[in-house]
Amino acid sequence: MKLELLTDLYEFSMANGYYHTLPRDKQARFDVFYRRAPDNGSFVISAGLMQVIDQVKNWHFSTGDIDYLPSLNHFSDDFLFYLTSAHNHCSIKAIPEGTPVFPREPILSISGPLIDVQLFETLILNIINHQSLIATKSWQITSATGGRPVMEFGARRAQGPDAAIYGARAAIIGGCSSTSNVLAAKLFNLPAAGTMAHAWIESFSDELTAFRAWAKIYPDNVSLLVDTYDVFNSGIPNAIKVFKELRSAGHEPVGIRIDSGDIAQLAIKARKMIDDAGFTNAKITASNALDAHIVKSLFDEGAPLDNFGIGERLITSSSSPVLSVVYKMSALENDDKWMPKIKISDSREKITLPGNKQIYRLYDKHNLQHAIADVIALADEQIGTEIASINADIHVTRNKVILTNFIAKPLLKQVLTLSNASPIETDSLAIQHFAQIELAQLPEATKRLLNPDRFPVYLTKRLADLQEKLVDKAQL
């Protein structure tokens, strides 16, 4: 689907105004970042860059778009004619997908003609907000399972087809092992998985007949849904009968799935019944409106669960359904010189960081697998062996810090220059693996699901001084 008109009307209104009041080649830079992580977490898993690059690189307005816009009675003919030949003149630098990103750090920065970068705002925010939110929720859930596989089951609960498709990809980036969404599996080469629904059981004369029919068709993929009627009096006994028939025919069952009821207690008793029957390798899968906290409570009760199918609370991030990523101007070109720009607020948290920036992740010099802090710097700063820095968290009491004994790794990479895209990783499982490596390098306290420690994020003194200077200037 073409998405050039997926924007708010005021973006076009401002672009029309720029066209008539400012030089048409005037350049601007906007940063994309968030202020607070969802679910009171400490970080967000970045996702959506692949789609952003694809949309920006191929940006142009169709004849149908241009024919529609005059009906809004809002734009000049000259501006609409300008749009007929508009195509991408923007460049993007971004943090790779799968990277844990902390508040105020630019996930991406886009530069180009002011008219163009203004028109990208809504589209870029829509993509980054949704996919990063779902990737983060996926990480929270898969972290709670302790490495046990999680199947993403959310297509029917997602808020529209696009959310289901790209949400499945984001869920894989965040840690899910597979998706039930066949279209997403096809488009992004994701592992597809699924068992059966209650309708299969109900379509036969009785439960045992239904189980046997499934086993006949799929003898090496027998995972039976045991809670259609009665888990203990029919579901598991019938499953065990079919398991024995499979084994006698040279096949081994996958296991059972429980989709309702007191899952912890059902799983405990089911495990004993299946083990006593000799099927100790059969897996127990749980589904039914699960999230990270419910999963943790199941394990706290001793539930012997092996796999999870998680849908609505993952694909909608229902406990924290909005990631408020914002799009703020950080620099504007005047007379061939880039001028830093800032947005002022009564809330210190909402004052933006001006200028062209780079983010460095600092690693312990004696343990390069241990990240100790992030530093946001101006892009032209040279990072030496010591960094005079200011804590980016306005709530801390120890504000000024000298950072030493580190190795610095830049996070923002150039991914698009005009219409030329630099190679980026697009394979979802490879991005998932990258994310797991990056996450393993963070302190364990930062990754707690409840009351996590804040990971230290600093501003270089030069960036902090520039921000203060612009704040003071704006208040004169």
Image (tube, rainbow, N blue to C red):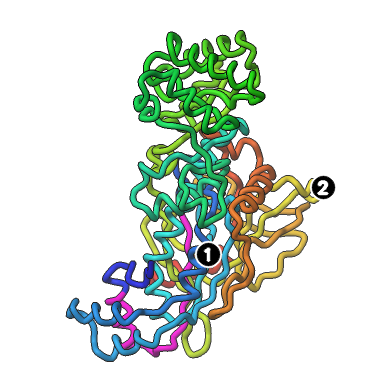
Q: Are marks 2 and 1 in contact (CB under 8 Å)?
A: no
Count of numbered badges drawn on the protein: 2
Q: Which residue is mark 2?
A: 366
Which label lies toward us, 2 or 1? 1
Q: Which residue is mark 1?
A: 108
Q: Does 104 sit above or below residue 319?
A: below
User: At which x and y percent is residue 201?
Assistant: 39, 25
Which residue range is magenta in the image? 12-35
Q: Secondary structure at mark 2?
A: loop
Q: Residues within 10 Å of mark 2 (few under 14, many from 20)?
A: few
Q: Residue at x 69, y 45 (%)?
A: 441
Q: Does 299 sit above or below residue 12?
A: above
- Residue 19 painted magenta: yes
User: At which x and y percent is residue 24?
Assistant: 40, 89
Q: Secondary structure at mark 1?
A: strand
Q: Does 238 sit above or below residue 458?
A: above
Q: Residues within 10 Å of mark 1 (few under 14, many from 20)?
A: many
- Residue 360 painted magenta: no
Seen as rendered, the residue at the extreme right is 366
The numbered disc on residue 27 is: none
Q: Residue at x 55, y 21 (%)?
A: 299
- Which image quarter holds the C terminus? bottom left
User: At which x and y percent is residue 33?
Assistant: 48, 59
Image quarter of residue 233? top left
Disc 2 residue type (three-letter): His
